[in-house]
Image (tube, rainbow, N blue to C red):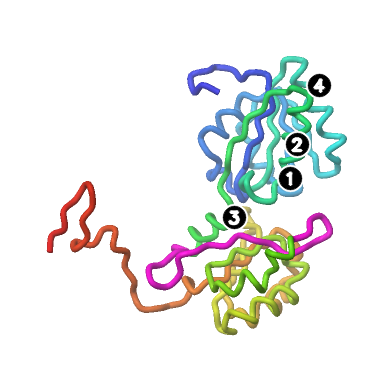
Amino acid sequence: MNSQDCSLQPAVYIIGAGPGDPDLLTVKAQKILSQADAIFYADSLVPKQILHGVRPEAELIPTGNKTLEDIIPLMIDRVRARRSVVRLHSGDLSLYSAIAEQIQALAEAEIPFELIPGISAFQAAAAKLGTELTLPELVQTIILTRVSGKASAVPEAEELASLAAHQASLCLYLAARHVEVAQAKLLQHYSADTPVAVCFRLGWEDEQIWIVPLEKMAAVTREHQLIRTTLYIISPALKKVAKTRSRLYHPEHSHLFRRAKF
């Protein structure tokens, strides 16, 4: 889509809505939402505030009670009727968004589509926590993963305990219902006092964040009856440690655009 277009071409625009805060939508996502003829949105995961800027005549179709077999024909019919369609997902499309099968179905039906990425919950969480998840000489890797559930199994090679062995900043999605098992596997490699940010409904009006030792991750989850829309960040970067500094802006460091001062 050209930024100067005044209307959308008939196609399916698959958009990542971010974790919930309407202000975290990308500019491109906002532009498309404001022009779309029809919007299919995951109403159980996307707050209504995200839809405040849509056209009054736009057709809004919640999909929380629909299967893929219900959704795909409806989107195809509208595009073939020369209408622009938004498929609105929570978070970012590259993580646990179940878009691969939608893309395949649209391609088979020769329906044009475009992907518009969003902010992921782990990025919003780091901003809320006022931290960087990769600190020099402490942790330089971020792992995004989940535990096996009814809807999707995790490959054996990506089993949580083996990933925990890296002691990286580990962002654990879709795990609240299995938190005791997850905690036990994490404790095989992280110390019991490793800080964990338990992030509930990031970006929503009822957002809550607790920072607790790893050994209390499950207890806090059960105490607050968290069963969904919860992200865990397990990271040495959340510890109150001695100051660290990147070499990037250090006066002793030179690069293509700057000579070292010492």
Neighbour class for label 4 at 10 Å: few (<14), some, many (≥20)?
few
Nearer the N terminus, badge 4 or badge 1? 4
Cα distance, mark 3 to mark 2? 22 Å
The residues colored magenta run 132-154
Residue lying furthest left in this view? 262
Cα distance, mark 4 to mark 3? 33 Å
Amino acid type, callout 4: Asp
The N terminus lies in quadrant: top right
Cα distance, mark 2 to mark 4? 14 Å
For the point 69% across and 77% down, the residue is: 185
Q: Nearer the viewer, mark 3 or mark 2?
A: 2
Cα distance, mark 4 to mark 1? 21 Å
Left or right of 66? Residue 240 is left
Percent x, y for residue 107?
73, 28
The C terminus lies in quadrant: bottom left
Amino acid type, callout 3: Ala
**Residue contact between numbered discs 4 and 1, judged by CB atoms under 8 Å:** no
Nearer the N terminus, badge 1 or badge 3? 1
**Residue contact between numbered discs 2 and 4, judged by CB atoms under 8 Å:** no
Q: Which residue is mark 3?
A: 121
The image quadrant of residue 250 is bottom left
The label on residue 98 is 1
Residue 257 appears in view: yes
When the figure is inspected, residue 81 is found, relative to residue 101, above or below; the finding is above
For the point 59% across and 55% down, the residue is: 121
Percent x, y for residue 192?
59, 84
Neighbour class for label 3 at 10 Å: few (<14), some, many (≥20)?
many
Q: Which residue is mark 4?
A: 77
Q: Which residue is mark 2?
A: 102
**Residue contact between numbered discs 1 and 2, judged by CB atoms under 8 Å:** yes
User: Does the magenta segment cover residue 142?
Assistant: yes
For the point 87% across and 36% down, the residue is: 69
